[in-house]
Image (tube, grey):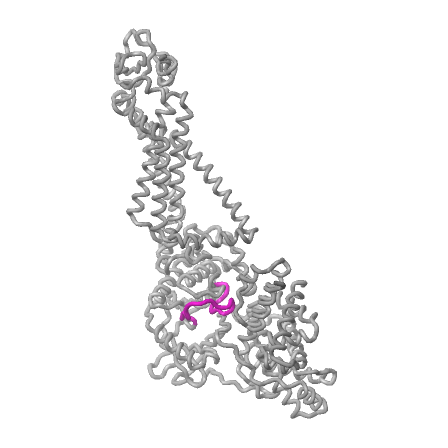
């Protein structure tokens, strides 16, 4: 059964880091400071896990599987951390989200390539689309992803932070380095209108 | 105001607030703006999914890259007093285990709900629901023992049914026959009737939730979503159920109802006989879109071999408008019983065809008898004519032909008009709004109620017939007056109205009453459609009144038919004058001699030497002496 949205939306557990703190922690992590790295990931990983849950197909949607997938993606991304120029946590979050998304796509491709070894019961062999696919369809997801990629970086971060990672405006203001929640809200609505126009163009 | 619709939509999506998309689409000033609104709606749904799933993951936020610790239930462990023996299945709702209850020494099934329902308030709701469902005692409803909570997990304890779901059965045995599906549908309807009678809704009737146990008994399962949270509208995705089985109004965020459960039974039956769904789509949005655009596949497209009675039962359960569906699970059960237990389809078709043909023949015979009897009475020839069934059928057919042609033409014209209206409604937003408003207007006028609609139909029929009667009063009075005593005794001048020279007046008379009858019949379409939708009939009194008005119209239309259109009689020469042969009886013949003194009938011996049969048939009312000019 589909049981969506019957509870109030949960608030983000950990507040994002201020831009200065993010830059500082990232610098320390790049220099090999594991405490700084853990602090950074403590802020970034939970929202990513919640986000990934809605994007994963059924068999991979268990809490453990989601955690593993996010951890793997983040670990792989950390190797390229020195190439990433961070301005605030929102940018890092968007970057990590892309890494997780790529990981999900890789898994989907592997699943398609893998030969069917045994005759699974129909219900288990069912592709079981992700909740997001179920809700808006695979084609719309593709269109959305493509349109997001074409947006300016700031718009991408606003969209990902608010729509996908479900930051409150207070948290989003911090994550995006905006002066106030109202400014963050304005950034989101503007980005949304630009995104809708991009999606219309296809 | 520039971009007002887009601004409001973007604000709503950004804030995660409810958006009235219908209003915003109405505000859009261009196709581009409408397209962008559509994409903002998709983005809103995307945000809803993420917002919801943010709550579905056990929080392992304080971990680093190591494995997470998750509280869960496992086979072999104990949950409360129960020992979990085997996992029977899992899904979006949680998971189901077979368990051993050591106190009562029996196996039960426990459905563990998600961790998210561990909230105290919701747990209380579930307990209340569990207690209520435990009161639904029915052979076709899984027995719910109650809801318990141990640790962080809430679970629904219920009867363990050994068998397979209909979904699994479909995979192993293939398509169900309409009889099998009908019998299953009957049991599901019985189960639903019991649930509804207890004041609850199931809200997730589907092949996966209906079990067939080893004895063949059908058991409706899974009441985890069975309570109705009540009124108000919700977001499109704020729903409980399985999209393909969900009624369109529920997908649009309206509350579930008994009729939305009935819709799901319709989908279940559709699926069992075709392995398809009436409305399909790869996502909830696509399904909603398909509903909105009326993209549904009739069952006969997949299974043209099914009896129409079965197709009708399923189709009615699947009506987009809840008011058009079966009024209750009991009503659907009754209809299913008829389709499953009746004789073979061809026998039913034969019986129906024979009944319709008999009805039509008897109707024609009655009409023929009416106009023939009237003709014989007014011509004073009753004793000289012997007519039987075949004659009446022939006269009935002749008299009914023109009204039937007119009715057919009116039907074709109405069908074409309906098509045009549908096309306009599809193309024009304004027309669509007007069409949408029609049910509301009907409701406001009380015409959604069968009794009121039927009363209006009676009143309308009386008005149509009364107006026609008033307009044609001189003709009606003249025709009725001819009976007393009869035409041969009446002054010849009175015959002139019946002359074919007055064909225009005769046509006007017939046409007037034909339209009155047609209007009378058309006015009954609405009450009968309502009756079919609601599964009940207008009261007998109103039906009787309507029938009486219609019968009066038909009588007025038909009684003078023969007199006006088929009055030709064989001409004879008798004693040098021209007469008409009204009838014959053994050795006698009855003549109508317009040039004689009243009464102008003469009974003569057939062998009378003064009688010469001319062999030609002429209308006596066109006789020269009945013409005003001739009389002058």
Quarter where residue B485 is shown? top left
Looking at the image, which residue sits at the far right? A83
Judge from the rendering whether residue B150 lies leftward or rightward of residue B601; answer left or right.
right
Quarter where residue B153 is shown? bottom left
In the rendered image of this protein, does residue A112 appear above or below residue B277?
below
Residue B226 sits inside the magenta stretch? yes
Nearest the viewer among B612 and B356 is: B612
Q: Position of residue B359 (x, y in %)?
A: 34, 38
How many labels, in total?
0
Judge from the rendering whether residue B582 lies leftward or rightward of residue B69; answer left or right.
left
Q: Quadrant of the C terminus of chain B?
A: top left
Q: Quadrant of the N terminus of chain B?
A: bottom right
Judge from the rendering whether residue A73 lies leftward or rightward of residue B373; answer left or right.
right
Question: Can residue B390 be seen from the camera position used here?
Answer: no
In the rendered image of this protein, does residue B237 appear above or below residue B375?
below
Q: Position of residue B218 (x, y in %)?
A: 38, 65
In the rendered image of this protein, does residue B403 appear above or below residue B127?
above
Question: Range of the magenta residues?
Answer: B225-245
Q: Main secondary structure of the magenta part?
A: loop
Q: Position of residue B464 (x, y in %)?
A: 37, 39
Residue beneath the point at 37% across and 54% down: B534
Residue B227 sits inside the magenta stretch? yes
Q: Position of residue B266 (x, y in %)?
A: 44, 59
Residue beneath the point at 35% across and 79% down: B106
Nearest the viewer among B278 and B306 is: B278
Residue beneath the point at 62% across and 74% down: A186
Question: Can residue A83 be seen from the camera position used here?
Answer: yes
């Amino acid at each position: 059964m589909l049981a969506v949205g019957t509870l109030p939306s949960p608030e983000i557990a950990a507040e994002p880091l201020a831009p200065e703190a993010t830059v500082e922690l990232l610098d320390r992590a790049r220099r090999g400071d594991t405490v700084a790295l853990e602090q950074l990931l403590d802020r970034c990983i939970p929202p990513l896990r919640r986000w990934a849950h809605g994007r994963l197909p059924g068999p991979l949607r268990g809490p453990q599987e989601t955690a593993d997938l996010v951890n793997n993606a983040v670990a792989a991304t950390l190797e390229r951390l020195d190439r990433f120029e961070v301005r605030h946590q929102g940018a890092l979050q968007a970057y990590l989200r892309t890494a997780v998304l790529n990981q999900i796509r890789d898994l989907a491709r592997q699943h398609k390539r893998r030969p069917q070894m045994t005759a699974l019961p129909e219900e288990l062999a069912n592709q079981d689309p992700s909740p997001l696919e179920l809700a808006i369809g695979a084609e719309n997801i593709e269109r959305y992803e493509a349109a997001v990629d074409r947006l300016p970086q700031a718009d991408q971060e606003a969209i990902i932070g608010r729509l996908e990672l479900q930051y409150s405006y207070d948290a989003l203001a911090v994550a995006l380095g905006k002066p106030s929640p109202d400014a963050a809200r304005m950034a989101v609505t503007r980005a949304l209108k630009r995104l809708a126009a991009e999606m219309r163009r296809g | 105001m520039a971009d007002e619709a887009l601004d409001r939509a973007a604000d709503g999506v950004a804030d995660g607030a409810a958006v009235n998309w219908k209003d915003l689409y109405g505000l859009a000033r261009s196709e581009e703006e409408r397209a962008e609104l559509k994409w903002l709606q998709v983005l809103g749904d995307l945000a809803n999914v993420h917002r919801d799933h943010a709550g579905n993951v056990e929080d392992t936020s304080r971990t680093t890259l190591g494995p997470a610790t998750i509280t869960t239930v496992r086979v072999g462990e104990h949950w409360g007093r129960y020992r979990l023996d085997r996992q029977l299945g899992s899904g979006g709702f949680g998971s189901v285990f077979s368990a051993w209850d050591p106190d009562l020494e029996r196996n039960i099934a426990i459905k563990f709900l998600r961790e998210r329902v561990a909230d105290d308030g919701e747990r209380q709701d579930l307990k209340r629901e569990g207690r209520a469902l435990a009161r639904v005692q029915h052979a076709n409803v899984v027995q719910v023992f109650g809801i318990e909570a141990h640790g962080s997990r809430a679970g629904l304890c219920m009867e363990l049914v050994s068998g397979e779901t209909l979904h699994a059965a479909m995979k192993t045995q293939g398509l169900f026959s309409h009889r099998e599906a009908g019998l299953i549908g009957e049991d599901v309807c019985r189960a639903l009737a019991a649930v509804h009678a207890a004041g609850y809704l199931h809200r997730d009737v589907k092949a996966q939730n209906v079990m067939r146990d080893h004895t063949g008994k059908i058991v409706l399962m899974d009441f985890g979503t069975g309570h109705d949270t009540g009124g108000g509208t919700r977001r499109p995705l704020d729903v409980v159920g399985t999209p393909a089985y969900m009624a369109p109004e529920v997908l649009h965020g309206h509350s579930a109802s008994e009729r939305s459960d009935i819709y799901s039974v319709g989908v279940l039956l559709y699926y069992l006989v075709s392995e398809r769904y009436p409305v399909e789509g790869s996502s909830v949005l696509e399904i909603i879109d398909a509903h909105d655009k009326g993209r549904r596949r009739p069952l006969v497209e997949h299974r043209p071999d099914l009896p129409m009675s079965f197709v009708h039962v399923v189709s009615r359960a699947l009506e987009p408008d809840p008011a058009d569906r079966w009024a209750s699970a009991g009503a659907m059960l009754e209809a299913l019983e008829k389709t499953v237990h009746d004789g073979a389809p061809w026998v039913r078709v034969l019986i129906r065809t024979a009944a319709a043909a008999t009805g039509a023949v008897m109707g024609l015979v009655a009409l023929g008898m009416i106009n023939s009897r009237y003709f014989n009475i007014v011509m004073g020839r009753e004793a000289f004519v012997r007519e039987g069934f075949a004659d009446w059928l022939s006269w009935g057919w002749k008299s009914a032909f023109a009204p039937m042609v007119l009715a057919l033409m009116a039907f074709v014209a109405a069908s074409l008009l309906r098509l045009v209206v549908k096309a306009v409604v599809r193309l024009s937003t304004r027309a669509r709004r007007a069409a949408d408003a029609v049910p509301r207007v009907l409701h406001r006028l009380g015409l959604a109620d069968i009794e009121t609609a039927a009363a209006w139909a009676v009143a309308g029929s009386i008005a149509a017939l009364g107006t026609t009667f008033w307009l044609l009063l001189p003709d009606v009075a003249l025709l009725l007056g001819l009976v007393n005593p009869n035409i041969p005794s009446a002054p010849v001048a009175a015959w002139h109205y019946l002359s074919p020279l007055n064909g225009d007046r005769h046509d006007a008379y017939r046409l007037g009453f034909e339209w009155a009858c047609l209007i009378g019949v058309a006015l009954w379409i609405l009450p009968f459609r309502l009756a079919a939708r609601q599964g009940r009939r207008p009261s007998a009194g109103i039906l009787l009144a309507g029938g009486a008005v219609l019968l009066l119209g038909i009588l007025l239309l038909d009684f003078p038919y023969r007199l006006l259109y088929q009055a030709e009689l064989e001409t004879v020469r008798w004693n040098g004058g021209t007469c008409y042969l009204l009838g014959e009886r053994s050795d006698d013949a009855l003549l109508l001699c317009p040039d004689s003194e009243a009464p102008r009938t003469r009974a003569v011996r057939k062998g009378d030497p003064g009688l010469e049969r001319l062999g030609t048939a002429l209308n006596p009312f066109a006789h020269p002496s009945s013409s005003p000019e001739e009389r002058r």
